[in-house]
Image: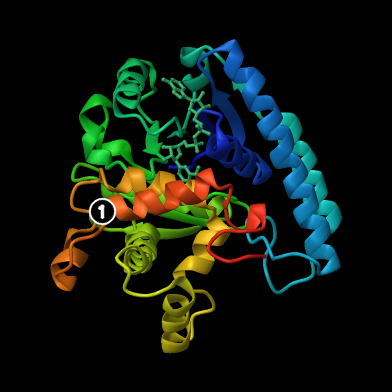
């Protein structure tokens, strides 16, 4: 199916970025929001994303910043005027709508990017199901929940799957595409193609998996490092060195923690300890129980001391 009209449900951090990116790539985009208050919160987010895109183009053109593959192809000189024109057009064109029926009336795809809350997502899908045209594909941007949890509430399990973006979508342009048992191959292929059309690198995930591809590797890696520290096995600097010198990787777990920020690390630790079985394969292999209590206490102490990572000048390291 040719996707033209995109509806994003939820205008938070990721919803505003997904909407802007799709509009930047020429799609007709509407964000559905539940209240007037949400409009007041989403507009400034879109304005901020707009400024980030303009800055990214400036930085790429002057060779000052990282290349943003969501904005322009790497390897060729950037066409600054064309990029700026597309950014201006995207900023002017994203529509905000409170009436769900009106928002989705002719939607080819609805991207659900609401807060990570199971009952709220179920209630939304139940409200949405009778309003959607038959053709509409429905995807969730959920980071930690599986689409099979929700498929039965959507009224279209064959057209329902996950399309998971990364924060700073214009720079970190991956899109993990993950079906559930009832997703049709056709919808999966349509979503992979759509991801490419909005300048994402589509990464197919053939089996449902908490954490998709990246977080299935990154989260256990980071927390294995933290666990070594929390259990008194070694210190952050030595653990980072073991990883970097042993593998040639540019950063160790504590350097990554400091970039991501301790607040996010703490929230991820809280979130992932609730994801059933997330750490278990690793635990069995290592035969050592994770010291989650110790890790959380350590992160909480750092938060209380204002050691938030690079952003505050100190995390596991001083900057
Ligand atoms: N933040 C990230 O880095 C990131 C990355 C990838 C995926 N995600 C996923 O994207 C989704 C949204 O995350 P976010 O970071 O943008 O969150 P956010 O808190 O910034 O935004 C959530 C949005 O959902 C809306 N919302 C909440 N409850 C609602 C309800 N009951 N009905 C209608 N709207 C409701 C809020 O008004 C807000 O616009 C989550 O599923 C999250 O797992 C987040």
Image x and y of residue 274, in percent: 25, 43
Image x and y of residue 163, in percent: 41, 46
* Camera-nearest residue between 318 and 92: 318
Asked if 192 appears above or below 26 in the picture, the reply is below
Residue to which mark 1 is pinned: 209
Q: Under tag 1, what secondary structure?
A: loop
Asked if 168 appears above or below 283 in the picture, the reply is above
Asked if 73 appears above or below 240 in the picture, the reply is above
Residue at point 34%, 62% (across, down)? 230
Residue at point 76%, 37% (across, down)? 89
The way the protein has been coloured in the rendering is rainbow
* Camera-nearest residue between 56 and 132: 56
Residue at point 38%, 21% (across, down)? 132
Position of 279 compared to 251: left or right?
Answer: left
* Camera-nearest residue between 228 and 31: 228
Position of 220 compared to 11: left or right?
Answer: left
Quarter of the figure that contains the N terminus: top left
Position of 7 compared to 215: left or right?
Answer: right
Position of 36 compared to 131: left or right?
Answer: right
Residue at point 35%, 22% (across, down)? 120
Quarter of the figure that contains the C terminus: bottom right
Image x and y of residue 265, in percent: 45, 51
> Can residue 173 be seen at all in this image of the molecule?
no
> Can residue 96 be seen at all in this image of the molecule?
yes
Quadrant housing residue 51? top right
Label 1: few (<14), some (14–19) or many (≥20) C-alpha neighbours in 10 Å: some
- Mark 1 lies within 8 Å of ligand 1 (Cβ measured): no
Quadrant housing residue 205? bottom left
Image x and y of residue 31, in percent: 56, 26
């Amino acid at each position: 199916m040719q996707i033209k009209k995109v509806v994003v449900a939820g205008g938070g951090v990721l919803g505003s970025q997904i909407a802007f990116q799709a509009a930047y790539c020429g799609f007709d985009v509407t964000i559905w929001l539940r209240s007037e208050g949400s409009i007041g919160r989403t507009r400034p987010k879109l304005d901020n994303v707009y400024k980030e895109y303009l800055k990214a183009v400036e930085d790429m053109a002057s060779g000052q910043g990282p290349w943003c593959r969501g904005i322009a192809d790497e390897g060729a000189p950037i066409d600054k005027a064309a990029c700026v024109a597309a950014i201006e057009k995207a900023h002017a064109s994203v529509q905000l709508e409170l009436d769900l029926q009106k928002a989705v009336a002719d939607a080819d795809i609805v991207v659900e990017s609401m807060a990570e809350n199971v009952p709220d997502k179920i209630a939304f899908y139940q409200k949405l199901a009778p309003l959607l045209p038959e053709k509409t594909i429905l995807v969730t941007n959920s980071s930690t929940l599986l689409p099979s949890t929700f498929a039965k509430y959507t009224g279209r399990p064959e057209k329902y799957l996950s399309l998971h973006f990364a924060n700073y979508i214009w720079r970190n342009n991956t899109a993990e595409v993950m079906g559930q048992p009832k997703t049709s191959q056709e919808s999966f292929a349509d979503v992979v193609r759509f991801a490419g059309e909005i300048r994402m690198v589509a990464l197919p995930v053939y089996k449902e998996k908490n954490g998709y591809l990246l977080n299935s590797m990154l989260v256990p890696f980071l927390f294995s490092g933290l666990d070594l520290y929390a259990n008194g096995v070694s210190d952050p600097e030595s653990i980072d060195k073991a990883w970097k010198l042993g593998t040639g990787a540019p950063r160790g777990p504590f350097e990554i923690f400091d970039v991501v920020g301790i607040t996010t690390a703490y929230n991820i630790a809280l979130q992932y300890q609730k994801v059933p079985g997330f750490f278990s394969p690793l635990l069995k292999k290592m035969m050592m129980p994770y010291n989650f209590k110790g890790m959380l206490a350590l992160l909480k102490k750092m938060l209380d001391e204002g050691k938030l990572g690079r952003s505050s000048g100190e995390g596991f390291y001083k900057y």
